[in-house]
Image (cartoon, coloured by chain):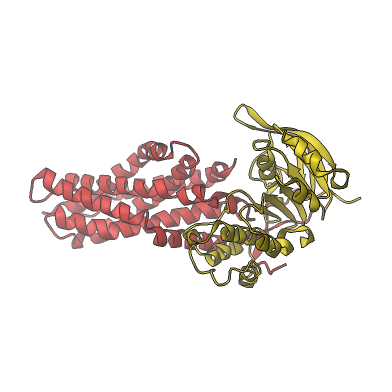
Chain colours: A red, B yellow
């Protein structure tokens, strides 16, 4: 048999009479899955360009529809986050499509791996998509809608983006895994995701609001950053507990 | 006494209200080949997917390689090779990238990927996206994927579909009777299927209609299943 690379005992040892099957080590599995995800996206360009174009178009529409030189404060924060959220949903909807349509799920389920590796790889994939989206969308938002330069607000904004992105990625992965095997996956994904994303939009918008006031730029509200962190932790635990069941027949 | 590689008793599997497998019984010794015949919709693919741990049995007992399903499915994964109707490969990735991906999931060394690409005669096309290959070539990659980790049990759902005679010959050492594995194979070809079989199971509408040693059967007995 070809050499198995780093292996660890498979699953629960109690009461087993047979020699334990071996399980492929966790981090190499995550690495293999993540590499595959990014390769497929690089070849197909199905998610990130669509997410970015959607965000850019929405900011352009807001720029003309609001008919004012600039926005700031709560209005600016609301426009920023609602747009990022809807753009993220495009990525969430496509997250498991290649796996479901091309048998990737079955290929994964046949392998002796910890299924949490797929959860982590998908969360990291969605985080990577969101990072690219925000590298494009946030400067565009600043140019099209924000009167003042966004530079001074960046440290606080990056912290808020990181916490919100983590929540979007975890919830998005959970919802995408649930929706993808249903016939109405394109509808069910957003319908399930949007209510769960509401606390993230509220927390992120409130935390961002003081950063986008041109007269006296403040710090992101610590209370709302803490709320985002708690929400991330809560859904991280829920995803960890539920994800295996979502992959089951 | 040898533990059967596959042991099924009273297996029931439903899709919604519809029973697609009912009362299936079989036992297969290690190293032997079971060929499953039956018309479309008879439950052959479902049986293979249950044995592969991809579907849960709804009633009855199923033991694969000594482990009870679904309770000990973790002990079976990684020890079976599955070739289904879908190749379980990503169309945008190349044959090499697909096999490398599965090799990493199974903890198999990189050399094995090169060795298998060579064995299925795809080294020259190994770096082209799968979507550019013919169906027969994709099927060869799917077989390479299934045997990558040198499984003890091969579950083969019409593995020779889309393959020309030369390709069938090429794949014989990997999934043919000489491969040394226990095999469960679905087929629609009475004479070809009987050739490599030790035991034959005939399904009709999800129920066992025939279970016999292959040596006692003629192709006409199999053809009867389809009438």
Q: Image point 87% across, 47% down: which residue?
A: B215
Q: Image point 57% across, 42% down: which residue?
A: A245
**Residue A85 shown left or right of residue B171 in the figure:** left
Q: Image point 65% across, 38% down: which residue?
A: B40
Q: Quadrant of residue B24?
A: top right
Q: Residue furthest right?
A: B1
Q: Residue furthest top?
A: B17
Q: Position of residue A63 (x, y in %)?
A: 14, 49
Q: Residue furthest front?
A: B220
Front residue of this view, candidates A213 and B49: B49
**Residue B176 shown left or right of residue A123 in the figure:** right
Q: Is any part of residue B67 visible from this angle?
A: no
Q: Position of residue A1 (x, y in %)?
A: 73, 67
Count of marks, rendered view: 0
Q: Quadrant of the C terminus of chain A?
A: top right
Q: Position of residue A28 (x, y in %)?
A: 56, 64
**Residue A5 shown left or right of residue A151 in the figure:** right
Q: Is any part of residue B172 visible from this angle?
A: yes
**Residue B179 shown left or right of residue A198 in the figure:** right
Q: Quadrant of residue B190?
A: top right
Q: Position of residue A220 (x, y in %)?
A: 25, 52
């Amino acid at each position: 048999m070809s050499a198995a690379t780093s292996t660890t005992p498979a699953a629960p040892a109690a009461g087993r009479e047979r020699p334990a099957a071996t399980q492929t080590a966790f981090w190499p599995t995550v690495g293999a899955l993540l590499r595959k995800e990014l390769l497929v996206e690089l070849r197909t360009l199905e998610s990130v360009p669509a997410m970015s174009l959607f965000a850019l178009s929405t900011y352009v529409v807001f720029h003309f529809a609001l008919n004012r030189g600039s926005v700031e404060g709560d209005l600016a924060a609301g426009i920023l986050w609602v747009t990022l959220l809807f753009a993220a949903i495009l990525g969430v909807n496509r997250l498991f499509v290649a796996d479901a349509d091309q048998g990737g799920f079955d290929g994964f389920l046949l392998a002796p791996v910890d299924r949490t590796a797929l959860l982590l790889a998908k969360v990291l994939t969605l985080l990577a998509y969101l990072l690219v989206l925000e590298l494009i969308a946030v400067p565009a938002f600043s140019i099209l809608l924000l009167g003042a330069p966004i530079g001074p607000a960046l440290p606080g904004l990056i912290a808020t983006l990181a916490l919100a992105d983590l929540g979007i990625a975890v919830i998005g992965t959970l919802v995408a895994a649930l929706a993808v095997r249903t016939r109405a996956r394109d509808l069910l994904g957003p319908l399930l995701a949007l209510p769960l994303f509401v606390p993230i939009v509220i927390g992120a918008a409130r935390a961002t609001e003081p950063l986008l006031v041109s007269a006296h730029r403040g710090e992101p509200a610590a209370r709302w950053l803490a709320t985002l962190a708690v929400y991330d932790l809560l859904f991280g635990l829920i995803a960890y507990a539920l994800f295996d069941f979502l992959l089951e027949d | 006494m040898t533990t059967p590689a596959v042991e099924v008793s009273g297996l029931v599997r439903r899709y919604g209200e519809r029973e697609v497998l009912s009362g299936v019984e079989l036992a297969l010794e290690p190293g032997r080949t079971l060929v499953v015949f039956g018309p479309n919709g008879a439950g052959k693919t479902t049986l293979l997917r249950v044995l592969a741990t991809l579907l849960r049995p709804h009633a009855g007992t199923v033991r694969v390689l000594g482990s009870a399903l679904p309770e000990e499915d973790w002990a079976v994964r990684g020890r079976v090779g599955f070739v289904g109707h879908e190749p379980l490969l990503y169309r945008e990735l190349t044959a090499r990238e697909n096999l490398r991906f599965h090799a990493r999931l199974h903890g198999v060394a990189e050399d094995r990927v090169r060795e298998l690409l060579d064995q299925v005669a795809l080294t020259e096309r190994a770096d082209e996206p799968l979507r550019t290959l013919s169906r027969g070539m994709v099927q060869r990659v799917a077989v390479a994927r299934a045997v990558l980790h040198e499984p003890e049990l091969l579950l083969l759902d019409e593995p020779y579909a889309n393959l020309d005679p030369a390709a069938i010959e090429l794949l014989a050492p990997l999934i043919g009777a000489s491969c040394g594995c226990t095999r469960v194979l679905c087929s629609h070809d009475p004479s070809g299927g009987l050739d490599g079989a030790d035991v034959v199971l005939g399904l009709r509408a999800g129920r066992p209609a025939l279970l016999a040693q292959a040596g006692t059967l003629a192709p006409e007995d199999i053809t009867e299943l389809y009438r």
